[in-house]
Image: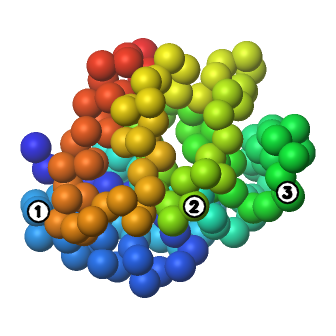
């Protein structure tokens, strides 16, 4: 079934390639480089793919930014801007927004496990196989032509886990 897919990455080159592949597969992909622009498009999409290594989030996401930065400190890692801030923002509002999301990154190790918003852990209960789909290693996506199938698997995981309920 065709989906409207939002691609958020501050490095536009990779999103343009993904956009072409998804468009050719019958989906409509919207590529954006800024979180504040992505916020304005959430009501028109069925799925969001977020790059983990993106520019700092807007002030409206300060709570989520603080959670991510504390997670980096607790893990003994340097603090940095992270797409996980936007992910946590979506996670906290998932029952009202009804938009599943996942991450695509050349650095999936920068995704922090067990981050909580209001005592609600992101991707609670996921298996390791599901984590590899929810936090996709861009380098593991051997053929970009596999991206449409990956998007469907993301949506299927969200449905199976009933995370939008």
Q: Nearer the viewer, residue 73 or 121?
A: 73
Can you tell which of label 2 and label 3 is closer to the viewer?
2
Mark 1, Cα crowd under 10 Å, few <14 / some 14-19 / many 20+, is some
Residue visible at 47% across and 80% down in the picture:
12
Q: What residue would you read off at disc 1?
A: 25
* Up-down relation of residue 124 to residue 131 (above or below): above
Q: Secondary structure at mark 2?
A: loop
Picture quadrant of residue 78:
bottom right
Which circle's residue, 3 or 1, is located before the other in the chain?
1
Alpha-carbon distance for marks 2 and 3? 15 Å
Provide residue 110's location: percent of width, then percent of height: 65, 53
Measured as percent of width and height from the top left, residue 82 is found at 69, 57
Residue pointed to by mark 2 = 107
Residue 82 higher or lower than 117, as above or below? below
Indicate the position of residue 2 as horizontal and vertical percent values: 14, 50
Q: Residue at x 41, y 42 (%)?
A: 132
Relative vertical location of residue 158 with respect to residue 37 in this rendering, above or below:
above
> Which residue is painted at 17% across and 66% down in the image?
145
Q: Residue at x 37, y 33 (%)?
A: 129
Indicate which disc residue 111 carries: none
């Amino acid at each position: 079934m065709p989906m409207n897919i939002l691609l958020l990455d501050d490095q536009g080159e990779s999103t343009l390639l993904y956009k072409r592949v998804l468009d050719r597969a019958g989906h409509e992909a919207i590529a954006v480089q800024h979180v504040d622009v992505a916020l304005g498009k959430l009501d028109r999409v069925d799925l969001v793919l977020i790059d983990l290594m993106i520019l700092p989030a807007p002030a409206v996401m300060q709570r989520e930014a603080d959670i991510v930065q504390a997670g980096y400190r607790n893990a003994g890692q340097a603090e940095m801007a992270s797409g996980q801030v936007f992910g946590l923002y979506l996670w906290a509002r998932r029952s009202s927004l009804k938009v599943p999301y996942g991450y695509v990154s050349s650095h999936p190790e920068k995704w922090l496990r067990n981050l909580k918003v209001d005592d609600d852990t992101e991707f609670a209960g996921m298996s390791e196989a599901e984590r590899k789909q929810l936090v996709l290693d861009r380098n593991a996506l051997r053929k970009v032509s596999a991206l449409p199938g990956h998007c469907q698997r993301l949506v299927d995981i969200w449905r199976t886990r009933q995370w939008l309920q």
